[in-house]
Image (cartoon, rainbow, N blue to C red):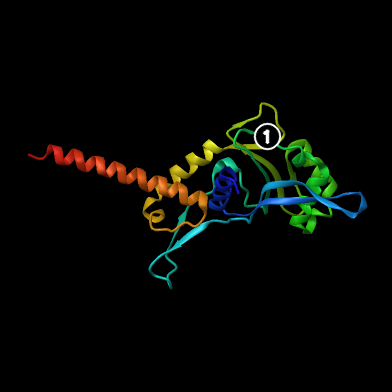
Amino acid sequence: MNSAVALVEAYLHANGYFTVTEYPIMEALPGGAYRVATDIDIMAVRLPHAGRLIPGPNVAGARTKGMLDPDPMLNTTDESVDLLIGEVKEGQAILNEGARDPEVLSSVLSRFGGKAMTQVESLVAALLKRGEAQMEGGPRVRVVAFGSHGAPRRAYHVITLGHILDFFRDAVEQHWGIMQQAHFKHPGLAFLMMEEKAKRRQEESRRRKKRSKRQP
């Protein structure tokens, strides 16, 4: 997993999504052979009202604290399950040819299963035209491109990597008391927390030096 995909995965986890990264799409060739046609950088599922609660000391009284409301940029919904098909770039946030291939999109929708396969043709058509589709009586499906900057013309949602970094920095600032005690195993979050801890320790060291110089 490259660093950009790791960052996007961490961002989606923080916003209540379950993810699958670098999902391979197989293609059948003449003669019974197969090959990987493309891979989808990230697929994500968020259930309605997904969030994170911090249990309080009184377990019986269920004293809890909510943490990290979903980022408005994701335009999450609590009306239905939210399914994302994501392309991740370090440069311009554009979709690969594979992510615009109806057969590839059909294969991705089969991974979600259920009603996706009963409505696959109409869903694929809507995704190609608008980057979003609503299953009848089921989840919402969207195509999202992540990158350093967006394309001028697009029929899909774009979220920049810079915005994701700002989101995490704001979250760390607001919830430092909680997050500094956590041990993050995810490489994306672990790096960001290491950076934040180093920055805070450096700032504290500077403040101490200034105080020591003021003392007679």
- Tag 1's secondary structure? loop
Q: In which quarter of the image is the C terminus?
A: top left
Determine if residue 136 is in view: no
Instruction: Specify the amino acid type for callout 1.
Output: Ile
Q: Where is residue 73 in the image (x, y as percent from the top left)?
A: 57, 40
Q: Look at 74% across and 37% down and name the residue there.
A: 130
Query: Which residue: 66% across, 29% down?
Result: 151
Q: Is residue 165 left or right of residue 130?
A: left
10 Å crowding of disc 1: few (<14), some (14-19), many (20+):
many
Q: Where in the figure is residue 180, as x and y percent of width and height?
A: 38, 54
Judge whether 173 appears above or below 118 on screen.
Answer: above
The residue tagged 1 is: 94
Q: Is residue 87 left or right of residue 49?
A: right
The image quadrant that residue 160 belongs to is: top right
Looking at this view, is 67 or 28 the one in front? 28
**Which residue, as the protein is rendered here, is positioned at the far top?**
152
- How many discs mark residues in the rendered view? 1
